């Protein structure tokens, strides 16, 4: 069985990734909100009166939410490709993707809380 997979090329794979980033930014409102939160909290992280290393920890933690949102959007698109019917497994797959986003937000929030507690007190 031949897979629908292009030959490996770092440049081509990079271009596919950029195409995906452009596509998700254009089509997914949840991703746009995650980007807005990312930019807002990045600015906050680097303007807090804390040591630079703590700012980097806060900044890097924000990528978790972006990654989870990308994975969630991919799951939703694959489910939509497979079926247009309302099916318990389709709903479950989409719900689990949303759960990944929620857990990433909780985890990032905890990183911020503990890091700021350490940095400020």
Image (cartoon, rainbow, N blue to C red):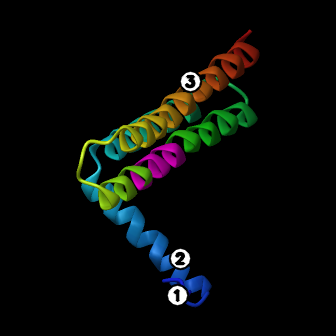
The earlier-in-sequence mark between 3 and 2 is 2
**Element under disc 1:** loop
Which SS does the magenta portion mostly show?
Answer: helix
Q: The N terminus lies in which quarter of the figure?
A: bottom right
Numbered label tally = 3
Question: Observer-nearest residue: 112 or 69?
Answer: 69
Residue at which label 2 appears: 14
Residues packed near mark 3 inside 10 Å, few (<14), some (14 to 19) or many (20 plus): few
Question: Observer-nearest residue: 23 or 59?
Answer: 23
Residue at which label 1 appears: 6
Mark 3 touching mark 1, by CB under 8 A? no
Given this view, does label 3 or label 1 mark the residue nearer the observer?
1
Query: Which residue is rendered at x = 52% and y = 39% of the image?
Result: 65
The earlier-in-sequence mark between 3 and 1 is 1
70 up-or-down from 4: above or below: above
The earlier-in-sequence mark between 1 and 2 is 1
Residue 9 is situated, as x and y percent measured from the top left of the image, at 60, 88
Residues packed near mark 2 inside 10 Å, few (<14), some (14 to 19) or many (20 plus): few
Given this view, does label 1 or label 2 mark the residue nearer the observer?
1
Residue at which label 3 appears: 106
Question: Observer-nearest residue: 118 or 4?
Answer: 4
Is residue 6 something one can see in this rendering? yes
Q: Quadrant of residue 78?
A: bottom left
Q: Is 70 included in the stretch rendered in magenta?
A: yes
Image-based side of 63 in relation to 117, left or right: left
Residue 63 is situated, as x and y percent measured from the top left of the image, at 57, 44
Q: Which residues are magenta?
A: 66-74
């Amino acid at each position: 069985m031949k897979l629908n997979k292009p030959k490996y090329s770092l440049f081509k794979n990079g271009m596919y990734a950029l195409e995906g980033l452009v596509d998700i930014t254009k089509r997914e409102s949840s991703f746009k909100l995650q980007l807005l939160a990312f930019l807002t909290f990045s600015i906050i992280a680097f303007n807090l009166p804390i040591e630079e290393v703590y700012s980097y920890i806060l900044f890097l933690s924000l990528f978790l939410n972006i990654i989870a949102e990308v994975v969630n959007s991919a799951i939703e698109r694959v489910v939509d490709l497979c079926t247009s019917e309302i099916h318990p497994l389709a709903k479950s797959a989409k719900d689990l993707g949303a759960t990944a986003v929620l857990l990433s937000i909780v985890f990032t929030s905890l990183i911020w809380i503990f890091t700021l507690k350490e940095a400020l007190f």
